[in-house]
Image (cartoon, helix red, strand yellow):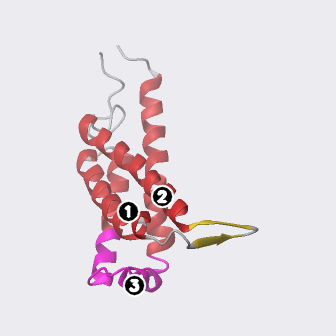
Amino acid sequence: MAHPIQGVLTVLGRLLLVGIFLASALGNKIQNFDAVAGAMAAKGIPQPKIMLVGAIVFLIAGGVSILVGYKARIGALLLLIFLVLATYYFHNFWALSPEAVVQFPGYERPHVEVEMINAMKNAALMGAMLMIMANGSGPWSLDGGGRRAAAE
């Protein structure tokens, strides 16, 4: 039988994992809808308002799905699609000028470096989505019937 802490750690992991997606949807994209749609248009994304609504749906549906562990594999797929597209359009460090810089309070960093770090963060999150797609949401989830950690 698996260690009893497995269920607690899995729930905590799901909560920490989806926080960034729910905060992005609720705290940024919805509240700043027109500005975000404008940024999407500037990146060449067609029909930015429609695409933004789709992104918000993917973020909320995927985040809640993983959080409660209901159809978590589908939720992870939604977030994986979002991450791939967000990385391609917004963190495309490979297309940036090496001379461009990003200003921070008191210092600056090369824009390529900043976006490479963001792309790597997204790649790590993509890895987490692939793990959920492969293994499901784990114990103490609706997909798992709320069961405790199963026997190995």
Res. 2 image quadrant = top left
Tell me where the magenta segment starts and ends, as one range.
30-55
Q: Amino acid at mark 2?
A: Met
Q: Name the mark on residue 42.
A: 3
Q: Name the mark on residue 87.
A: 1
67 lies left or right of 16: left
Image height check: is 121 above or below 111? above
Q: Residues within 10 Å of mark 1 (few under 14, many from 20)?
A: some
Looking at the rendered image, the disc whose residue lies closer to the viewer, 1 or 2, is 2
State the residue position of label 2.
116
Residue 130 location, x and y as percent? Answer: 29, 43
Measure the C-alpha gap from mark 1 to mark 3. Answer: 15 Å
Res. 107 image quadrant = bottom right
Residue at image position (60%, 71%) is 102
Residue at image position (28%, 81%) is 50
Residue 58 location, x and y as percent? Answer: 31, 63
